[in-house]
Image: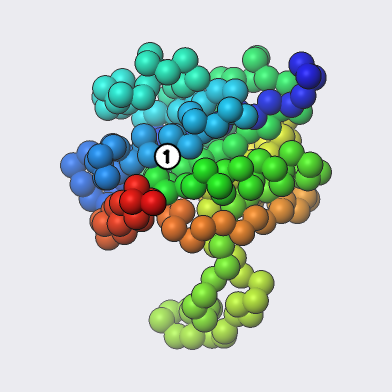
Amino acid sequence: MSNMPKCWVVIPAAGIGERVGSSIPKQYLQIAGKTVLQHAISPFVGNGRIAGITVALHPEDTHFSTLEMNATTCDKIHSVIGGETRAHSVLNALDSIEAQLAKDDFVLVHDAARPCLSNNDLDLLIDACLTHEVGGIIGSRVADTIKHVENNNIVSTLDRENIWRAYTPQMFKFGLLQSAIQKAFKDNIYITDEASAIEYIGYQPCMIEGDARNIKVTTAEDISLAEIFLQEEKRK
Ligand code: CTP
Ligand code: MG
């Protein structure tokens, strides 16, 4: 049993939420009774397959330590200072846990700004990735027709059949993910999620179809939408 790979979680939460435009970073706004960040962490705290959670924080963060669920009150949770971009924050968190992990342990990276991850989708991802040779991510099919636009003119229509939205969590072996992000940085490749780093070094992660309500809070309207989804979930 002791040789079984463990699952660890990294939550990049070091952003300032500029596009939401509120006075505090979006991950600390209250929706449906808790902060966005608490909602984002909650499925992992309650999941018996998760060994530990590392939250990457802005160097000037004053909010995290005041949450009910923080590094002092929950022994599964740790914090680390994040970096200049999301990918730097993720790499800082990976580096901070390296000493306690085996290379074959898994890491699930989940945005602090995604408060609506269901327990079911989390379990689906873990089940699929534990046996997949690369790892994978949660996403959903695109419903709209997708246009390639240049200078406000439509150049072409993409084949929607093969287009998916990439969500988080994204789950990969620790060693593979850390070296993929390091390689992307070294080559000056800008990555917006973990899968793109893994793709960059030549692998094909799997895509697991998840609930489309697992939105990333990006603008002020998304706050209202996330609140509706969470209230719906509470009523079940
Ligand atoms: N993030 C991070 N470190 C950064 C930038 C972002 O850990 N230097 C985190 C955010 O806190 C968020 C996730 O990465 O949980 C996704 O990023 P995004 O939605 O872009 O959040 P912000 O960067 O905070 O928002 P904005 O781009 O509007 O400023
Ligand atoms: Mg950002």
Q: Residue at x 48, y 29 (%)?
A: 45
- Asked whether mark 1 lies closer than 8 Å to ligand 1, one says yes
Q: Residues within 10 Å of mark 1 (few under 14, many from 20)?
A: many
Q: Nearer the viewer, residue 61 or 188?
A: 61
Question: Which quarter is ligand 1 in?
Answer: top left
Position of 207 relative to 7 (above/below):
below
Q: Residue at x 51, y 26 (%)?
A: 53
Position of 37 relative to 93 (above/below):
below
Position of 182 relative to 51 (above/below):
below
Residue at the front extreme of this rendering: 236
The percent coordinates of residue 52 (x first, y second) are 55, 23
Q: Amino acid at mark 1?
A: Ala
Q: Is residue 3 left or right of residue 52?
A: right
| SS of the residue under disc 1 | helix
The percent coordinates of residue 226 (x first, y second) are 34, 54
Task: Report if residue 84 is visible in the image.
Answer: no
Q: Residue at x 68, y 26 (%)?
A: 6
Q: Nearer the viewer, residue 61 or 236?
A: 236
Q: Is residue 176 left or right of residue 170?
A: right
Q: Which residue is mark 1?
A: 40
The percent coordinates of residue 20 (x first, y second) are 27, 52
Q: Check the picture and name the quadrant holding the N terminus.
A: top right
